Image (tube, rainbow, N blue to C red):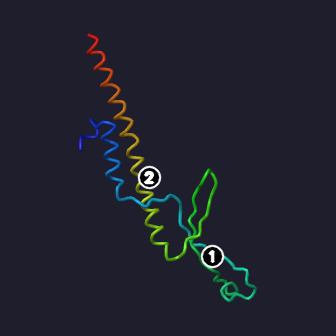
Amino acid sequence: MKHVDSESPSDVARWLRSESTNLWPALLGSLSLRRSRCIRKNCPACQSGEQHQSYVLYGRANGRRVAVYVPEELVPEVQRSLDNGRALQDLLHQAAPRYIKALKRQRAEASKSKKSRAV
């Protein structure tokens, strides 16, 4: 891999693809364990204060908060996907300045070559 100060936009794209290869499935949001009462009048769990627990994935869609029920057996897979989503988000944050610098460098080199051809 080229040094970061001399990489091209395609180098950055190649780096991002190689780093993100193993980050699927990837999700954004948060997984929460919630406790709530049920609708049964004489539920022992609700009467004892223990209530019923369930997992919910919270996220955003079209600017609105959404919640999706997650069965307990899927929690490890969803949590791994959320971890991958955060890792992918970190990679995108790293890629942004590198890509902009590479674009600027490419533009400067193109400008230099135009000037040298004109002379």
Specify the farthest residue to the right. Answer: 41
Residue at position x 60%, y 54% in the image: 61
Q: What residue type is labelled 2?
A: Gln
Instruction: Say which mark, if any, is on residue 35.
Output: 1
Task: Name the quadrant containing residue 112.
Answer: top left
Using residue 36 as the reference point, say whether residue 77 is left or right of it.
left
Image height check: is 55 above or below 81?
A: below
Give the spatial CA distance, label 2 vs label 1: 30 Å
So how many labels did they put on this image? 2
Residue at position x 31%, y 51% in the image: 18
Q: Which amino acid does label 1 sit on?
A: Arg
Q: What element carries label 2?
A: helix
Q: Where is residue 74 in the image (x, y as percent from the top left)?
A: 49, 73
Residue underneath mark 2:
89
Instruction: Say which mark, if any, is on residue 106.
Output: none
How crowded pointer 2 is (Cα within 10 Å; few <14, some 14-19, many 20+) is rated as some
Q: Where is residue 72 in the image (x, y as percent from the top left)?
A: 52, 76
Specify the farthest residue to the top. Answer: 119
Q: In which quarter of the image is the C terminus?
A: top left
Using residue 47 as the reference point, say whether residue 84 is left or right of it.
left
The disc, 2 or 1, on the residue closer to the chain's N-terminal end is 1
Q: What element carries label 1?
A: strand
Answer whether labels 2 and 1 touch (C-beta < 8 Å).
no
Q: In which quarter of the image is the N terminus?
A: top left
Using residue 87 as the reference point, say whether residue 113 is left or right of it.
left
Image height check: is 33 above or below 15?
A: below
